[in-house]
Image (cartoon, rainbow, N blue to C red):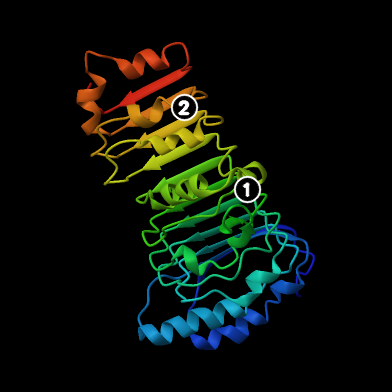
Amino acid sequence: MRLNNLRGDLEVINLSHEKDVATEYGSAELKDKKYLRSLTLEWDSHVEIDEAEAIVGYEMSMEGLQPHENLLELTLTNYGGVKVSTWLSSLTNLVNLTLKDCKKCEYLVSLNQFHCLKVLNLQNLESIELPNLKGWWREIVISGEEDEHISLPCLPSLSKLKIQDCARMTCLPLYPHLEQLTLENNLKPLEETLRMKMMMSSTAASSFFPLSKLKTLRLTKIENLECLLDWFESLTSSLNKLYIWDCPKLKDLCLGILHLSSLRNLWIEKCEGLADMLNGDDGIMWKALNGRLHSLQLWFCQI
């Protein structure tokens, strides 16, 4: 029985990375199950064979697990291949894509065909570099006094993005409709995005204003963050909620936070370095935020 009428969510765990399982997984014929909406594939993370052989096994096993192109949500966990299967490119209806603990993965397929993608969650991808995600950027030329090459977003529907433990990422696309952004252990993607925005001409900015709809920003475990720089001014018009958690070297908020005219909710936790600023007599920041904030929470900040 092929269960081709299976509907809803399917979760497959403890997948093997042995080479001989590829044919077995292929016989499941997931690509014929056109009514599935959500698929989770989780591999057994314990590798007891040669690493090179294991990588080949992971990639072969994934190849046999191709789902139907109608799939809306896909989660890959503990996948140990260097690259993902090319069938990922065919899932053009994806709304939610999660890759978690795929530590060997260096290359993804081009993402520029995922026009419906709203949620992208990348966690613990130690080997991935954002420039390898070809299709996240599209080059255009803006004519003016000098021709200028500008990169524009290719994921126009994306509204929620989480990047966690992806230390080699240095940039991300200029998402025009992103509403929620979470960055853990690495602030470089946001810094580079806002730097690129400042380089864009007024003509480009009017069409694709980067992060212009960002409402919620979460910064967690960013060890080298010492202050919120004035590039936060780029988030003035929309940012409503700001969460900062476990950034022990953070000493000053004023440069960045005073620009956030739409800020209504501020949560700061485990940022011991802010003690002097929070307890200061001048109170510049608090005066600026007085009457603006609806919610303020300070946890373990030694105030």
Residue 64 screen position, x and y as percent: 62, 80
- Relative to 200, is 238 above or below? above
Q: Position of residue 220 (x, y in %)?
A: 36, 42
Q: Earlier in the sequence, mark 1 or mark 2?
A: 1
Q: Is residue 19 left or right of residue 1?
A: left
> Where residue 213 sits: x, y (%)?
60, 37
Q: Categorize mark 2 by other alpha carbons within 10 Å: few (<14), some (14-19), many (20+).
A: many
The residue depicted at 44 percent of the width and 81 percent of the height is: 55
Relative placement, left or right, of 208 versus 282 is right
Residue 302 visible to an observer of this rendering:
no
Quadrant of residue 159 in the image? top right
Q: Please state, as top left, top right, bottom left or bottom right, where the C terminus lies in the image.
A: top left
C-beta proximity under 8 Å, tags 1 and 2:
no
Q: Is residue 132 above or below residue 215?
A: below
Report whether 286 appears left or right of 178.
Answer: left
Residue 290, which numbered label? Answer: none
Quadrant housing the N terminus: bottom right
Residue 40 can be seen, yes or no: yes
Name the kind of residue labelled 2 in the image. Answer: Leu
Q: Which residue is nearer to you in this view: 20 or 278?
A: 278
Where is residue 60? Give x, y as percent: 55, 83
Q: Find the distance from the CA under tag 1 to the CA under tag 2.
A: 23 Å
- Residue 9 position (above or below residue 81): above
Residue beneath disc 2? 260
Q: Nearer the viewer, mark 1 or mark 2?
A: 1
Residue at label 1?
A: 204
Mark 1 is on which residue type? Ala
Q: Quadrant of residue 279?
A: top left
Q: In the rendered view, does 59 fall on the left or right side of 286?
A: right
**Residue at the extreme front:** 145
